[in-house]
Image (cartoon, rainbow, N blue to C red):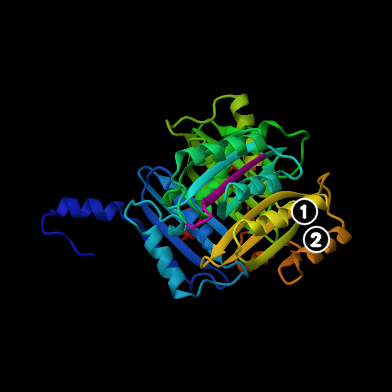
Amino acid sequence: MVWSSSLDEYEKLVIRMNTPRVVIDNSVCPFATLVKVDSARKEGIHLQAVQVLTDLDLSIRKAYISSDGRWFMDVFHVTDRHGRKISDESVISYIERSLGAAGDEISAGPRSLESLTTLELVGADRPGLLSEVFAVLADLRCYVVEFKLWTHNGRIAALLFVKEDSNSPIEDSDKICRIEARLRNVVRGATTAFASSATGAGGTFADRRLHQLMFADRDFDRADCVRGEPSVSVQNWIERGYSVVYVQCQDRPKLLFDVVCTLTDMNYVIFHGTIDTKFDRACQEFYIRHSDGSPISSEAERQRVIQCLQAAIDRRASEGLRLELCAPDSGSGLLVDATRTFRENGLSVTRAEKSTTNGETSANVFYVTDAGGHPADRKTIEAVINRLGAGSLRAYEDRPIWIEDNRVGLDDDEPSTAGTGLFYLGSLVKRNLYNLGLIRSCS
C-alpha cells in the first residue's frame, strides 16, 4: 500500500485497522479452501462477505462468525459446485480484492445492465401469468435482457431488465407509464419501472431485492399449512442478551445468503454463528440482537422471525422439473414462444431466470409443474421439447451434490436439535477461537 505524504501515523493506523484482512488458504483443510476475513465491524459486513462467495457460485460447507466489540472475524470453508478446492488464481484474486476493499461497497452485477430499465412486479400468481407478461412486453417492443422470477405461497415477484427493441434504453416517460399500466393489469398487483443501476442489477443484488419485495408483500403470512421443513427455532438467552436462531433443513446453493440476508434486512445484527453441512443437511446457528443491542422482546416477534426465515428458505426451493432453454437470442420472441408453449400444455412456472452471454446467446431456466402444482407428466414434457426443439430445450433433475461430511472436517459433537444452542455460547466462542487458530484447545 502506497501512503500519501499528507497522512500522519495515526491516520495510517486507522486505515490499517479498518481495511479488512483477507487470508485464503488451501493447506489447512485437505478438501476445502479456507477464506478468513477480519476487520473492524460495520453494518452488513457478514452479508457482504457471503455475497461475494455466493456470486462466485461457491458452496459454503462450514463457517464461523464471531464479533467481539468493534471487531469481527468470519471463516468460511468453501468449495466449487463440484466439491473441489478453489484452484483458479483469478477467482482467488477476485475474492481478495472484493473482500479486502477498505469499507467500499462490493462490486455489483454486470455493468451491461446499468443502462437498462428495471421492472419490478409483485402480485398474485396464476397459470400462464409469465406468458402474458412477455406477450405485453413484446407488443410494446421491449427486449428482455435478463430477468428473475420467484413464486411463493400464491404470490409472484419478478425483476426484469429491459430495453427498446432497437437496443437503446427506454427513455420515453410516456412509454414507461404505458408499460407500467399494462403490466399492472396483467399482474393485478404492484408494478414499478426505473433506471437500472450498478448496485441493483444481477447476482445476489437481484436476489436480495426479490426477498425484499416478497417480504413487503407479506408472503410469509400466507402459508396454508405447517410443515416440518425448514425447521427454525428462536429462543432468548437472557443472561447473555442474545436471541438464538437455529435453522435445520436440506442444504442447497445460496442457503446461507438467504438466511443472513433476511436477518440483516429485518435489522438484526449477527454477533456469533456456526454453519455446518453433513451430506445434504445444513445446520445454522446465529446469536443475534437488534441494532440497538436488545434481543427479541415478544412472542409475536419471535414467531415473525421464524415465519420470515422459513419463507426466505422456501422461496428459492426448487419445485418442479428444471427446463433449460439455450438458443441464439432473438429478442423477446424466444421467451414469448417458450412460455406460451408451457401455458398451452398446462404447465405452470414456479421459478425462472434468464441471462445473456455476449449479447447473442441467452440461457433461460424454468422450473415447471402442472397447473395443480404437481410433477409434470412425462408425455407433456416430451411434447413441449418437441415443439421448441430438442436441441434448444432440455430437462434436468435438479439434484444437489452431496459432499461427505468428513471431507470438510465437520465436528461430530455439534448440537443436532433445535433449542440446544442456548447452552452453548461459551463453547461456541471457544470453538470459534480454536478453529481460527487463536487458542490451543477448546476444552
**Residue at image x 81%, y 46%?**
373
As drawn, the label of residue 384 is 2
Q: Are marks 2 and 1 in contact (CB under 8 Å)?
A: yes
Which amino acid type corresponds to the residue marked 1 in the rendered image? Phe
Badge 2: how crowded within 10 Å, few (<14), some, or many (20+)? many
Q: Nearer the viewer, residue 348 or 421?
A: 348
As drawn, the label of residue 4 is none
Furthest residue to the left?
Answer: 6
Segment colored magenta: 156-167
Residue that badge 1 annotates: 342
Could you tell me if residue 1 is visible in this image? yes
- Left or right of 32? Residue 278 is right
**Residue at image x 45%, y 39%?**
173
Main secondary structure along the magenta-highlighted residues: strand
Could you tell me if residue 419 is visible in this image? no
* SS type, badge 1: helix
Quarter of the figure with the N terminus: bottom left
